Image (cartoon, grey):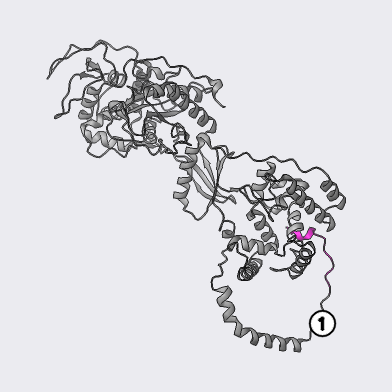
Amino acid sequence: MPSLSDFIPRRPTPRLPRVNWRAATLTVVIMANLCLGGWFAFDRAFLQDLPQVPDKEALWSMGRPPGLTFVGPDGQVIGRRGPRHGPPARLAEMPQHVPLAFLAIEDRRFYQHGAMDLRGVLRALSVNTRAGAVVEGGSTISQQLARNLFLAPEQTVRRKVQEVLLAAQLERMLSKDELLELYLNRIYFGGRAYGLSAAAETYFGKAPRDLTLAEAAVLAALPRAPSRLSPANDPDAAWARGQLVLRRLGDMAWIDPGLAARTAEGPPPPLTLLAADGEGDMAWAFDAAAAEARQRLGGATPDLVIQLTVDPQAQAIAGHIVRRTLAREGARRGARQAALVALAPDGAIRVMIGGADHAASPFNRVTQARRQPGSAFKPIVWAAALDHGVRPMDWRQDAPVRIGGWRPGNYGGGYHGQISVQRALHLSINTVAVRLAREAGLGEVGALARRFGLTGVPENPGGSVALGAYEVTPLELAGAYQVLQTGGGKTSPYLVSKITDARGKLLFIRPPSASVPIYPTYQAAQMVQMMRGVILAGTGREAGFGRLAAGKTGTSQDHRDAWFVGFTPDWLCAVWVGNDDSRPMARVTGGQIPAHIWRDFMLGAHRGLPDLEFSWFPAVPPPLYVEEPPPPAPLQDAFGPVRRNAMARDADLPAAETEATPVDWSEIPY
């Protein structure tokens, strides 16, 4: 491959005079004796703490200010943090006028000298003396690179000597083209842009390969004073320096002098300044992804490109709905916070809304808040009962139950008497949940919960496990429900799919993996049908959005937490509503505010998707509840005849106080 130096016009190299080798040898001996005595002092002054030059690969990342670039599932940039580091800019992929512009203003004899250019130093001294100010520098590109990579910004003789020594090592290690390429990718251009790719995007909205001559001249002018000459801060000063670059290019005939003159006399190139990074609702996902990257890779590679699974459009819709619903319903009911997480069937996190406002509170309630799930835990109890041989149309007593001194009751204090297992789930009957948990075995319920991913449930839980007394995060609960969405397969929710460094080197990729079967498929289908009944004719009626969906409401003690978790074949979504200080809400239940948020989000997420059945469903699926036969004869309970209360409903759901207002899609920013 030809070097850039092949395209630079050169002046003839003068012939060297003949050498008197006897005199030269005598001179070397004398100099060696003179230098030997001073070597130890030189070593002490300049070499003892001289930084070590690593291998070529490490030079691209060492000492680089931390910077993160986040891209979405389609590879498009969705956000940045810290300094901007674009993809590597390669000499072979950019027009010649781009690197020549930098050489013209920074080091015109780059391909003719070594680490230090004595002629350049003398020329700069002469120019600066005539101008009465520092107009031209004497450092070579190799010296500038050594300074930026290894040394502190101090103006001392010691640092200058070390700079030359390090530059010499770089010259021995790398070719001239490699040195120039590394320089272009490591230099600071102002505006938080490090490297030519980031600078071209920051100021002109394009890649280095698309830069015009005028744009290249402006960028080449920046390394000398990146803040003062930044086009964003002083476009006139930036263009004046760019015109100097153009005149240098023409004077040296590196480009056509007429073209250089016309470009310099023309208007400055139009700026396309990169907008300031506004993370908005993406901030929670960026926080979590950055933490995962640090955990996986440590601090060895600070500049990373992280590919997320989050869908930016769905994230914007979810954030809007959460804030809108909290403002309309939560304010008067004492509900100040909410969290929403949505998963694709393979566990990819498509939405992560960790609260009402990240700027006000960056605490991520999706991954960090451990709260009681209440009745949203009951699908685990019912799943354990099915695993124990219970069938949806078996009948159980909804009647007072006592475990030691604990007497769990239903919401409103009434009982239904004989009720089917599936109807008890629709109405979230507490007494039946306790009976089923004891039938299946409390230890078995705990074991199944841990297999589903709820690691906070102990091996030997108490009876209150049936009512969701053990804390979970919304992400954990969503992952547990996904076992049922996938037909009994366990998938681990994940946010980061790939990580590369700034040069495109792959550092991490999530391998494709199938779900691990942990629960029987037919029983998962039975659970889905029962949970569809929760929305069709149970506590989750207000979550209905016109499609068959399975879900469950949940409310913890004293209305401190309210949940709705549910899914279709395409999306799974978990919603929590409450207060960070666990202050009770005004009788908010899972079938109210959380169900409204869930419904409105799912309605938007399914727009344009076909209404399909689960691909894993049995050929003859379990029956979906419509009407139940009359129950058997009333049973007597140990506490006497069963009290019936026709008005008693789910322990989750008192009668809804207001009809939810459907979302106005014109309000959503997408």
Q: Is residue 455 above or below residue 376?
A: below
The residue sitting at the right extreme is 258
- Looking at the picture, which amino acid does disc 1 mark? Arg
Query: Would you say residue 439 sits in the magenta stretch?
Result: no
Q: Is residue 71 left or right of residue 428?
A: right
Residue at 82%, 63% in the rendered image: 10
Q: Nearer the viewer, residue 383 or 537?
A: 537
Element marked by disc 1: loop
Is residue 95 in view from this perspective?
Answer: no
Query: Can you tell which quarter of the image residue 519 is in?
Result: top left
Report which residue position mark 1 lands on. Answer: 18
Q: Nearer the viewer, residue 209 or 232?
A: 232
Residue at 65%, 67% in the rendered image: 167
Q: Nearer the viewer, residue 407 or 358?
A: 358
Q: Percent position (x, y) of residue 473?
A: 36, 36
Badge 1 density bin: few <14, some 14–19, many ≥20, Cα 10 Å: few
Q: Nearer the viewer, residue 91 or 243?
A: 243
Q: Is residue 379 left or right of residue 358?
A: left
Query: Can you tell which quarter of the image residue 669 is in?
Result: top right
In the rendered view of the protein, which quadrant contains the C terminus? Answer: top right
Q: Is residue 57 left or right of residue 527?
A: right
Q: Is residue 42 above or below residue 658?
A: below
Q: Is residue 406 above or below residue 368?
A: above
Our reading of the magenta stretch's main secondary structure is loop
Q: Percent position (x, y) of residue 252?
A: 83, 58
The magenta stretch is 1-14
